[in-house]
């Protein structure tokens, strides 16, 4: 049996990594088998986030059953069952009962050792949440792999989202060797690590206020043997002015979608003319660009006229009325 699907086309040597990345982003059509085309592999995708290379027919994996399929076969009526996989850990949201049974199913389907449930919203300056163990070993430390880098972290002590893996690859592809890049709110270093790994002659600096995240960021720099990436631990408002005393940045990444606009003026002042700011924010689904520009203008005043929109895209769904977007902004004056 075959089904038609959107697909992405990648060289054979990069297929395994790409399949894992797409699976973590929930964009891989896991029920369909990838297929060869010369020196390339065609990977079936859902086509809702990743830009597809076309449509093609793929064989159906008869043996594959997703968590959703299994629950449906069992006749289980669950109000909500969402999860994301970070290395050997799954973090889930389950509503409607049978948490532990579903957690075990998630573990076996995704081959993870621990399944945690979200027990609170993101809280505090460090944007971390409480987690409750549902299945397996109570060990929150794991190593996640994406875009050719390994990222060690503690899911209970730091914020991390695997859903931004495409964005990290996109920005790394835009970065040129020789650029000086700043990653504000760098966390355990995912943006900085991916950029530094792919552009060995770029200088990448990450600034992070959470001391636990800084420890893992430093560890991850060594883990990936990167000499062009550096971590500064502290408040961006104190550190960035010192970093630009001798030279400003060619590119600045701002992956803080909630209230990140309060730091847009600092980023603008730290950017060279002709440089790019990658600004992430939560906006109303009904009018995303207008909402984003309102935030920028309110915090930059007249200087907002010195930023030109080069590109924007929806990054992910957040709620019924809110989405996360990214704007690539060029400093023109």
Image (cartoon, helix red, strand yellow):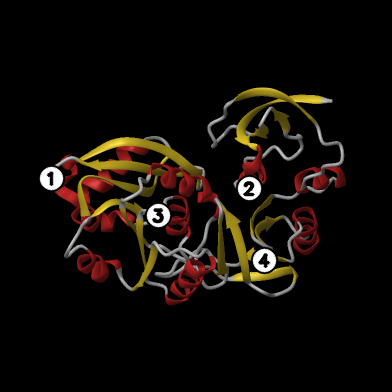
Residue holding disc 4: 116
Q: Residue at x 47, y 46 (%)?
A: 167
Q: CA distance from mark 4 to mark 1?
A: 46 Å
| For the residues bearing labels 4 and 1, Cβ distance under 8 angstroms | no
Residue contact between numbered discs 3 and 2, judged by CB atoms under 8 Å = no
Q: Of marks 3 and 4, which one's residue comes earlier in the chain?
A: 4
Identify the mark nearer the N-term, 1 or 2: 2
Upstream in sequence: badge 3 or badge 2: 2
| Image marks 3 and 1: residues in contact by CB distance under 8 Å | no
Helix, strand or loop for disc 1: helix
Task: Give how far across and how far down residue 185 sits, in percent.
Answer: 38, 62
Q: Residue at x 65, y 48 (%)?
A: 20
Q: Is residue 198 left or right of residue 145?
A: left
Question: With respect to residue 124, does 23 lie above or below?
Answer: above
List x then y, in percent, for residue 63: 87, 41
Task: Provide the residue designation for mark 1.
Answer: 302
Is 173 on the left-hand or right-hand side of 92? left
Q: CA distance from mark 3 to mark 4?
A: 25 Å
**Residue drawn at the location 46% of the way across and 59% of the way down:** 193
Query: Which disc, if any, is residue 17?
Result: 2
Identify the residue position indicated by label 3 in the image.
Answer: 255
């Amino acid at each position: 049996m075959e089904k038609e699907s959107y697909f992405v086309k990648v060289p054979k040597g990069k297929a395994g990594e790409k399949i894992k990345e797409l699976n973590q982003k929930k964009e891989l059509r896991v029920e369909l088998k990838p297929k060869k085309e010369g020196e390339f592999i065609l990977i079936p995708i859902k086509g809702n986030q990743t830009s597809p290379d076309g449509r093609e027919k793929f064989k159906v994996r008869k043996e594959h059953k997703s968590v959703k399929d299994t629950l449906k076969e069992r006749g289980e009526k669950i109000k909500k069952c969402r999860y994301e996989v970070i290395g050997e850990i799954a973090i889930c949201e389950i509503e409607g009962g049978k948490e532990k049974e579903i957690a075990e199913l998630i573990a076996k389907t995704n081959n993870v050792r621990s399944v945690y449930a979200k027990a609170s919203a993101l809280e505090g300056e460090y944007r971390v949440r409480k987690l409750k163990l549902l299945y397996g070993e109570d060990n929150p430390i794991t190593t996640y792999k994406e875009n050719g880098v390994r990222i060690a972290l503690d899911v209970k002590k730091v914020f991390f989202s695997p859903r931004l893996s495409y964005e990290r690859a996109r920005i790394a592809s835009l970065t040129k060797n020789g650029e000086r890049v700043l990653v504000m709110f760098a966390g355990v270093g995912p943006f900085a690590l991916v950029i530094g790994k792919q552009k060995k002659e770029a200088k990448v600096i990450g600034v992070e206020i959470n001391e636990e995240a800084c420890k893992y960021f430093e560890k991850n720099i060594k883990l990936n043997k990167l000499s062009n990436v550096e971590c500064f631990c502290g408040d961006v408002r104190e550190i960035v002015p010192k970093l630009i005393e001798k030279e400003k940045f060619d590119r600045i990444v701002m992956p803080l979608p909630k209230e990140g606009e309060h730091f847009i003026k600092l980023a603008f002042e730290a950017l060279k003319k002709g440089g790019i700011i990658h600004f992430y924010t939560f906006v109303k689904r009904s009018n995303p660009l207008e909402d984003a520009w309102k935030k920028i203008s309110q915090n930059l005043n007249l200087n907002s006229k010195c930023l030109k929109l080069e590109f924007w895209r929806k990054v992910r769904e957040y709620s019924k009325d809110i989405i996360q977007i990214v704007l690539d902004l060029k400093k023109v004056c």
